[in-house]
Amino acid sequence: MTPTSCYPKCSTCQKAKKWLDEYNIEYTERHIVEDNPTYDELKTWYKQSGLPLKKFFNTSGLVYKEMQLKDKLPSMSEEEQLKLLATNGMLVKRPLVICEDKVFVGFKETEWEVLKNKKVCQ
């Protein structure tokens, strides 16, 4: 099973789930607000992804904007940013698909093509 963190009301998450279903890719859905990723999970996924930590922030979200994180993040350490992400699922970019060898942040169909061959992340 592919662990997938999402927010049910998010249209991007809905598109991602539809895409996964269309290609018969098994996944376990995790409500990112009710079951927010922990600091340790986020740290692991961040290291595994090879992406800049900013990619894990939902920069278009209201919470991000209300907290004025665009201006604050550059002066925060990685640890501070990870701890902040772990406080509120609405700060986390979604969907998040976690595979053994890859972490997908956000839904980009071209990046997700590799999942078609795997059917499940193992």
Image (tube, helix red, strand yellow):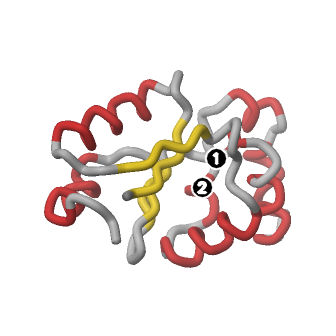
Q: Nearer the viewer, residue 42 or 69?
A: 42
In the picture, the disc for residue 63 is: none
- Which residue is drawn at the image coordinates 78% and 45% (left, top)? 69
Seen in the picture, residue 6 relative to 81 is either above or below; the reply is above
Q: Position of residue 94 (x, y in %)?
A: 52, 43
Q: Position of residue 55 (x, y in %)?
A: 56, 56
In the picture, the disc for residue 92 is: 1
The residue indicated by pointer 2 is 56
Q: In the figure, is residue 91 to the left or right of 112?
A: right
Seen in the picture, residue 113 relative to 33 is either above or below; the reply is below
Calculate the distance from the C-alpha at mark 2 to the C-alpha at mark 1.
6 Å
- The answer to which quarter of the image holds residue 23 is top left
Describe the element under mark 2 as helix, strand or loop.
helix
- Give the amino acid at mark 1: Val
Tell me if residue 90 can be seen.
no
- Give the amino acid at mark 2: Phe
Q: Quadrant of the N terminus?
A: bottom left
First along the sequence among labels 2 and 1: 2
Q: Quadrant of the C terminus?
A: bottom left
- Rate crowding at label 1 as few (under 14), some (14 to 19) or many (20 or more) other CA atoms within 10 Å: many
Seen in the picture, residue 18 relative to 46 is either above or below; the reply is above
Tell me if residue 11 can be seen.
yes
- Which residue is drawn at the image coordinates 41% and 74% (left, top)? 100
For the image shown, how many numbered marks are present on the structure? 2
- The answer to which quarter of the image holds residue 62 is top right
Residue contact at pointers 2 and 1, CB within 8 angstroms: yes
Q: Nearer the viewer, residue 106 or 119?
A: 119
- Rate crowding at label 2 as few (under 14), some (14 to 19) or many (20 or more) other CA atoms within 10 Å: many
- Which residue is drawn at the image coordinates 55% and 44% (left, top)? 30
Describe the element under mark 1 as helix, strand or loop.
loop
Q: Position of residue 114 (x, y in %)?
A: 21, 63
